[in-house]
Image: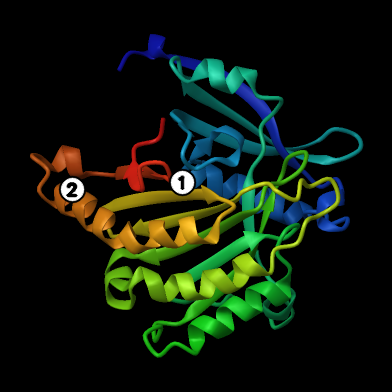
Amino acid sequence: MSDGEWRLMRGVMMTDERITAYGGFSVPVEFLEAAAAQINRHGLPMHVEHDLARPIRVRNVSAHVHHDGEFNQLRCELEVHRDDAPRFESLPGMSVTMMRPIDRDAELRVETWGGVTISADHAWFDDEALVAAESALIADERCDQGVSIKRAYQFGLVPDPQIYVDVAYAILLSIGASAIWDGVKVLWRRRRTPAGGIADTPTTVNWTISDSEHSLTAVIKTGDETNAARAIDSLEQATRAIFENHSNAVSAAEAANSKSVIVWDADSSAWTPPS
């Protein structure tokens, strides 16, 4: 791919300004510096409006912290594929989603780990809702790999009601998607509408399923719990098909760093590629 197929972009991704949607939460400058170091080491996946079903192809990402006289800013420079550049340029700005421990775990200064990690936007789902989901999963003897819960912060104007589920492929097959959904469902039902939020905004549940070589993002966006349950019923089958196809890749080059995205289409009751 030639250099002519890429466009250089710059922008501010995050600052330490207080965020009204999260009760005046402010990101410590130490976190901004750590985030910049993480981005410079490992790169950064990018999506349109925090929608995991709408990825933007980027490369050569670099970040640094700059003080503008009032706030500390996490600034980013990157190259965007020319076919994705119009979508990138039409956005009002850049922003990131970050995960942080809930107060209980932060106070203990313990970074919890589990076979299943559930995160949810803190404006729409409070700590008590996350703990309730954790308790429901722990009570299920199938979830013997442990559970981790985290707040999600979306840096934008008004965040969307987003839930994130991260699980290894082998654990998904061992536990079963329905067992994980039983915990997520508890969280779903305890959703609240924050100031500035729209009550009938659909909830988005983002599943990230991965092994050592492949990653699948499965996105369910709906306001109907029954529709979400139908998606879960067929998630394992869709995941198996994609991972088996990956394992049968023609070459190692095809298999390396392979990522897939599928979206639940309620009209056809099927998992489809993003539109």
N-terminal of the pair, mark 1 or mark 2, is 1
Q: Nearer the viewer, mark 1 or mark 2?
A: 2
Q: CA distance from mark 1 to mark 2?
A: 23 Å
Query: In what element is the residue under mark 2?
Result: helix
Q: Nearer the viewer, residue 272 or 135?
A: 272
Image quarter of the N terminus: top left
Q: Position of residue 31 (x, y in %)?
A: 70, 55
37 to 124, vertically: above or below: above
Three-letter residue code for mark 1: His
Classed neighbour count for the residue bearing mark 2: other residues with Cα under 10 Å, few (<14), some (14–19), many (≥20): some
Query: In the visual, does 123 lie left or right of 232?
Result: right
Q: Position of residue 239 (x, y in %)?
A: 27, 56
**Residue underneath mark 1:** 42
216 to 1, vertically: above or below: below
**Residue underneath mark 2:** 246
Query: In what element is the residue under mark 1?
Result: helix
**Residue 76 visible in the picture:** yes
14 to 90, vertically: above or below: below
Three-letter residue code for mark 2: His
Residue that extends furthest to the right in the rendered view of this protein? 70
* Residue at x 71% of width, y 46% of height: 159
